Amino acid sequence: MKANREDLFRQIEPPPGGAERLSARLAAAPSPRTSLALRLTAAGGVAAVALAAAVQLHERFHPPAPAPGDLSDLSASPEFDRLLGREPRPYELTVSV
């Protein structure tokens, strides 16, 4: 069955009142400039939240390193007595069964 070429390309009239409804919808739609500004604002907000979350996670799992030369916590450890030239501290050995 061969279709008539004129049937394929015939002009169709819009539905009654369709052109008026379309122009009203286009007039009520936000302008592309407003839409772009809204998208950029939303993208900036998402980026700010992602950056804040990344900083919080980094600080939680990587605590700040002690300042160079700050051995206050380390030098008090009894494990380093021999390395630092101090006499080992006596301690009592206990065994629990």
Image (cartoon, rainbow, N blue to C red):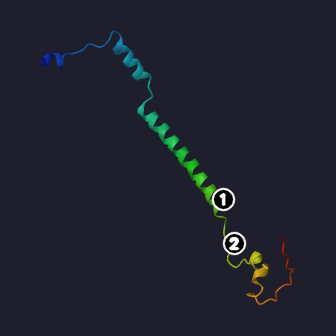
Q: Residue 2, labelled with which disc? A: none
Query: Which residue does the image show at 30% across and 14% down from the upper left?
Result: 14
Q: Is residue 93 found left or right of 12 in the rendered image?
A: right
Pick the front one: 89 or 35: 89
Instruction: Using the image, determine if residue 9 lies above or below residue 47.
Output: above
The amino acid type found where label 1 is placed reads Arg
Query: Which residue does the image show at 41% across and 20% down from the upper left?
Result: 25
Pick the front one: 29 or 78: 78
Residue at disc 2, secondary structure = loop
Instruction: Using the image, determine if residue 22 lies above or below residue 53.
Output: above
Q: Is residue 1 found left or right of 83 in the rendered image?
A: left
Picture quadrant of residue 82: bottom right
Task: Of the two numbered discs 2 and 1 on the same chain, state the one appearing first in sequence.
Answer: 1
For the residues marked 2 and 1, what is the alpha-carbon distance in whole angstroms?
A: 16 Å
User: Which residue bears the numbered disc 2?
Assistant: 66
The amino acid type found where label 2 is placed reads Pro
Asked if the residues shown at circle 2 and circle 1 are in contact, with their CB atoms under 8 angstroms apart, the answer is no
Pick the front one: 5 or 94: 94
Query: Which residue does the image show at 66% across and 59% down from the upper left?
Result: 60
Q: Is residue 95 found left or right of 60 in the rendered image?
A: right
User: Which residue bears the numbered disc 1?
Assistant: 60
Quadrant of the frame with the C terminus: bottom right
Residue at disc 1, secondary structure = helix
Tag 1: Cα neighbours inside 10 Å, few (<14), some, or many (≥20)? few
Residue 79 spot, x, y in % from top left:
76, 81
Tag 2: Cα neighbours inside 10 Å, few (<14), some, or many (≥20)? few
Residue 24 spot, x, y in % from top left:
41, 18
Residue 83 spot, x, y in % from top left:
73, 87
User: Which residue of the protein is positioned furthest toward the front in this rendering?
Assistant: 97
